[in-house]
């Protein structure tokens, strides 16, 4: 759903069912549970000895109504129906004047009122949560822009999963741009979480979007990012600025298939080539993350790889490879990637993410981002002249 559609849905108010962005609620069929419970109590009372009454059990019915419904009036409606059932049961058993009947009537009113208050408070919390998720979604779309299916000579897809259960943005970052130097991308991970991590990620991404176009050398792009990060951390007066750092990997893919990779303390990308195993794209020489060295000393070595049409390069954050199962074993991305490599890049990332979740067996404990690039150069037949003289892609 688009952001505009979500906003319209929010303005229209919540409806029965799952709240926007929520984890889901009871199905509509659950609304019948209070009536079923009421009927069971009435039937049980009918077949019970006249000296024993089960009328007090009716007090649980309006409480059940508050659980299964997101409508504030539903517990009150069920409370009225329950009161009617209580009077019918007392009338049939000649117990209208007994204290147990009076106590049951009072208890039903009290429980129905509590259910109404509970449903009202829960609905307000759901609205506040949906509003917070809307803000997070808008912020994510501004900070982490959607990746188009094709950028220059590559096809691309991204998958991002935030660790926070009710948030859609965290400390991981990615970006993909088409420049006169070729297609360039970055995937990184900011130390920590929360607002400070988001501010740091925004500073790095803003610098990359400028440096990727201006700097012809990829190592100088990394130096530009280091300078911008250092300035942003000190200008924003981050707490614990001495311990702030960002791991990231930069990649550039030229029209001829020459890929350049510069890594600053980040997990090495993986190259997937048809007919071959997964190859780790990393150098023996390691460079610390940005924020550790003085910005003037940030000059990571550049690795060059020749790509063939169809080759895929996967960039990812440590939230993927450091995802542990219940026994403490890390997710073996390099081993399992070939089993999910068929199909469109977006389908590949979706299957990998599902496999990671199955491996962990629960919600991921860290943000996880993946960017998959497939070298797919444009052929002359795929480029057509546009009416205004510009080129368009088929």
Image: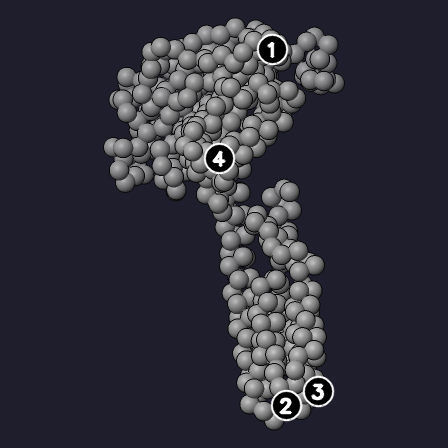
Query: Quadrant of residue 154 in the image?
Result: top right
Mark 1, mark 4: which one is toward the viewer? 4
For the C terminus, give its image quadrant: top right
**How far is mark 2 from mark 3, CA to CA?**
8 Å
**How far is mark 4 from mark 2, CA to CA?**
58 Å
* Mark 1 or mark 3: whose residue is earlier in sequence: 3
Cβ–Cβ under 8 Å for marks 1 and 3:
no
Query: Which SS class for mark 2?
Result: loop
Provide the residue designation for mark 2: 95
Residue 270 on image: x %, y %:
49, 17
Query: Which SS class for mark 1?
Result: loop
Provide the residue designation for mark 4: 360
**How far is mark 4 from mark 3, CA to CA?**
58 Å
Q: Is residue 147 above or below residue 258?
A: below
Q: Which mark is residue 92?
A: 3
* Mark 4 or mark 3: whose residue is earlier in sequence: 3
**How far is mark 1 from mark 2, CA to CA?**
82 Å
User: Would residue 46 be visible to someone looking at this image?
Assistant: yes
Mark 4, mark 3: which one is toward the viewer? 3
* Mark 1 or mark 4: whose residue is earlier in sequence: 1
- Is residue 151 rendered to the left or right of residue 382? left
Q: Which mark is residue 274?
A: 1
Q: Residues within 10 Å of mark 3 (few under 14, many from 20)?
A: few
Q: Residues within 10 Å of mark 2 (few under 14, many from 20)?
A: some
Residue 10 on image: x %, y %:
60, 54
Query: Which of the pair 55/269 is nearer the observer?
Result: 55
**How far is mark 1 from mark 3, CA to CA?**
79 Å
- Is residue 74 rendered to the left or right of residue 372? right
Query: Which SS class for mark 4?
Result: helix
């Amino acid at each position: 759903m688009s952001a505009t559609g979500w906003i319209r849905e929010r303005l229209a108010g919540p409806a029965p069912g799952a709240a926007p962005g929520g984890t889901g609620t009871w199905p509509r069929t659950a609304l019948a549970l209070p009536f079923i419970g009421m009927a069971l109590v009435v039937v049980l009372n009918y077949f019970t000895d006249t000296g024993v009454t089960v009328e007090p059990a009716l007090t649980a019915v309006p409480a059940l109504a508050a659980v299964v419904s997101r409508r504030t009036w539903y517990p009150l409606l069920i409370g009225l129906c329950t009161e009617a059932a209580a009077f019918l049961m007392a009338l049939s058993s000649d117990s209208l004047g007994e204290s147990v009947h009076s106590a049951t009537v009072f208890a039903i009113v009290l429980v129905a009122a509590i259910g109404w208050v509970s449903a009202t408070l829960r609905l307000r919390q759901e609205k506040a949560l949906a509003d917070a998720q809307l803000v997070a979604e808008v912020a994510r779309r501004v900070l982490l822009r959607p990746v188009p299916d094709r950028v220059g000579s590559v096809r691309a897809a991204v998958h991002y999963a935030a660790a926070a259960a009710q948030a859609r943005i965290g400390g991981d970052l990615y970006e993909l741009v088409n420049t006169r130097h070729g297609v360039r991308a970055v995937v990184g991970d900011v130390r920590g979480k929360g607002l400070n991590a988001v501010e740091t990620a925004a500073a790095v991404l803003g610098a990359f979007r400028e440096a990727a176009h201006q700097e012809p050398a990829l190592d100088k792009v990394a130096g530009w990012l280091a300078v911008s990060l250092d300035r942003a951390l000190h200008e924003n007066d981050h707490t614990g600025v001495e311990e702030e750092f960002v791991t990231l990997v930069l990649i550039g893919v030229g029209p001829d298939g020459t890929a350049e990779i510069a890594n600053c303390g980040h997990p090495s990308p993986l190259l997937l080539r048809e007919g071959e195993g997964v190859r780790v794209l990393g150098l023996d020489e390691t460079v610390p993350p940005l924020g550790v060295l003085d910005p003037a000393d940030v000059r990571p070595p550049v690795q060059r790889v020749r790509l063939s049409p169809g080759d895929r390069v996967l960039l990812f954050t440590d939230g993927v490879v450091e995802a542990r199962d219940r026994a403490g074993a890390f997710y073996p991305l390099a081993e399992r990637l070939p089993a999910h490599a068929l199909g469109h890049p977006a389908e590949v990332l979706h299957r990998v993410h599902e496999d990671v979740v199955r491996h962990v067996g629960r919600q991921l404990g860290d943000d996880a981002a993946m960017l998959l690039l497939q070298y797919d150069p444009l052929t002359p037949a795929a480029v057509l002249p546009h009416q205004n003289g510009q080129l368009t892609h088929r």
